[in-house]
């Protein structure tokens, strides 16, 4: 039985991913920082609730200990938890604004990966999927003419965009440091979720496709890459 953890999974892409992987036969731990909401969501999709606030070191450590006691290993980790933060002109963004976003989008992924790494290394074929965004594409960010092709998806948000770019780099460096694991970043596209007030053109079912696809790769699958529904993409 494949054991999977999904962070930020009480709604949106995380919940749909939990639903899909449960159907694939995975034992899914549905991570949520709200215990009641997480329990309801887990019941709805046949997953196991796990109290998990990725911005809280103690909570992450406790969650890892629970999974260790119950299963002894982790086969798949989906780092899905993310926040958008406030959209302001770059000159108005404070360090506190940046930290509020990075603490979840980047440091949260690092906290969870670090805490669950001993359990992942006990798996025969460990997989990590970091849910990123096209807002972290450096090539697009550097080319204003390319922004128009992504409207209304494209926003210029110093905390959000830079956190996604940082998560992409975290993915590459983890993949190089841990060659036995399959570690990739994915972009679900402009998906209708709470993060964008449900303005996205893609449904959560469509957005979850690439997350599920990369969660199901085997030991010979790719690592250190960035993927959309259209396949591998340049950073």
Image (tube, grey):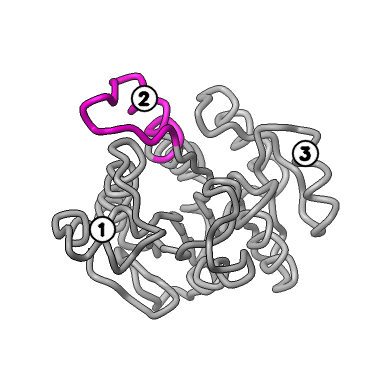
Q: Say which residue appears at 30% left-offset and 69% top-offset.
A: 149
Q: Nearer the viewer, residue 194 or 67?
A: 194
- Report the disc number at residue 107: none
Q: What is the x, y in percent for residue 185?
A: 38, 60
Residue carrying label 1: 137
Q: Is residue 101 magenta?
A: yes
Q: Helix, strand, or loop for circle 1? A: loop
Local crowd at mark 2 within 10 Å, few (<14), some, or many (≥20)? some
For marks 2 and 3, give the CA distance: 26 Å
Q: Earlier in the sequence, mark 2 or mark 3?
A: 3
Q: What is the x, y in percent for residue 200?
A: 53, 61
Q: What is the x, y in percent for residue 129?
A: 46, 59
Q: Is residue 22 visible?
A: yes
- Report the disc number at residue 97: 2
Q: Say which residue appears at 65% left-offset and 43% top-offset.
A: 31
Q: Nearer the viewer, residue 228 or 94?
A: 94
Q: Closer to the observer: label 2 or label 3?
A: 2
Q: Helix, strand, or loop for circle 3? A: helix
For marks 2 and 1, give the CA distance: 21 Å
Residue carrying label 3: 37
């Amino acid at each position: 039985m494949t054991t999977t953890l999904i962070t930020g999974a009480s709604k949106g892409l995380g919940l749909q991913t939990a639903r899909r992987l449960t159907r694939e036969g995975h034992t899914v731990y549905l991570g949520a920082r709200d215990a009641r909401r997480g329990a309801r969501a887990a019941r709805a999709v046949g997953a196991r609730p796990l109290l998990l606030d990725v911005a809280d070191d103690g909570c992450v450590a406790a969650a890892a200990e629970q999974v260790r006691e119950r299963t002894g290993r982790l086969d798949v980790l989906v780092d899905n938890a993310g926040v958008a933060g406030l959209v302001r002109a770059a000159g108005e963004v404070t360090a506190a604004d940046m930290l509020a976003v990075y603490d979840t989008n980047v440091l949260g992924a690092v906290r969870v990966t670090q805490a669950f790494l001993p359990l992942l290394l006990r798996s025969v074929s460990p997989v990590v999927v970091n849910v990123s965004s096209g807002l972290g594409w450096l090539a697009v960010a550097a080319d204003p003419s390319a922004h128009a092709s992504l409207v209304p998806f494209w926003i210029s948000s110093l905390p959000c965009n830079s956190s996604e770019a940082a998560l992409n780099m975290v993915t590459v460096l983890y993949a190089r440091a841990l060659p036995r694991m399959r570690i990739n970043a994915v972009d679900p596209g402009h998906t209708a979720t709470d993060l964008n007030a449900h303005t996205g053109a893609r449904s959560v079912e469509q957005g979850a496709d690439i997350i599920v696809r990369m969660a199901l790769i085997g030991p010979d699958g790719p690592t250190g890459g960035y993927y959309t529904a259209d396949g591998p993409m340049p950073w």
